[in-house]
């Protein structure tokens, strides 16, 4: 798995507006990819999910496919799947 941290979404051949960024894009074997947003706290989960959805909507998914995962990472907070399918989890779930 390759991660492009702090990259514009145009990194890894994704097309979006120049003003739209993701915290990270993850590229998996076979060209599958995930979009990641990192926020400071649980009160920002919904805002982070909306921002992530807006960014993903601007990507030419006919060229790169839909993301296999939309993830909002928090410092602390729940692990849950939001109504739109976005997953949220604290950093401790994905790292030491």
Image: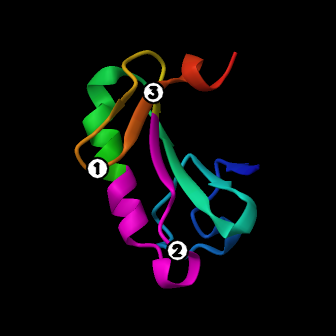
Q: Position of residue 39 (x, y in %)?
A: 43, 32
Q: Position of residue 86 (x, y in %)?
A: 36, 45
Residue 65 - label: 2
What residue span does the magenta drawing correspond to?
52-72
Q: Classify 10 Å Cα crowding around label 1: few (below 14), some (14-19), many (20 and above).
A: some
Residue under the point 40% across and 24% down: 79
Residue 60 seen: no
Residue annotated with mark 3: 89
- Cα distance between the residues tagged 3 and 2: 24 Å
- Cα distance between the residues tagged 3 and 1: 16 Å
Residue annotated with mark 1: 50
Q: Is residue 24 above or below residue 94?
A: below
Residue under the point 57% across and 17% down: 92
- Cα distance between the residues tagged 1 and 2: 20 Å
Q: What quarter of the picture does the C terminus occupy? A: top right
Count the labels in the image.
3
Q: Horizontal placement of 41 versus 31: left or right?
A: left
Q: Horizontal placement of 58 versus 83: left or right?
A: right
Q: Position of residue 44 (x, y in %)?
A: 31, 30
Residue under the point 46% across and 73% down: 59
Q: Horizontal placement of 23 versus 79: left or right?
A: right
- Asked whether the beta carbons under mark 1 and mark 2 sit within 8 Å of each other, the answer is no
């Amino acid at each position: 798995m390759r991660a492009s941290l702090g990259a514009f979404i145009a990194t890894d051949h994704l097309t979006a507006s120049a003003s739209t960024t993701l915290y990270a894009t993850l590229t998996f074997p076979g060209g599958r990819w995930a979009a990641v947003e990192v926020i400071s706290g649980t009160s920002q989960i919904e805002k982070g999910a909306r921002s992530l959805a807006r960014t993903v909507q601007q990507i030419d998914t006919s060229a790169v496919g839909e993301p296999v995962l939309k993830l909002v990472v928090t410092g602390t907070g729940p692990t849950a799947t939001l109504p739109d399918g976005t997953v949220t989890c604290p950093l401790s779930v994905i790292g030491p």
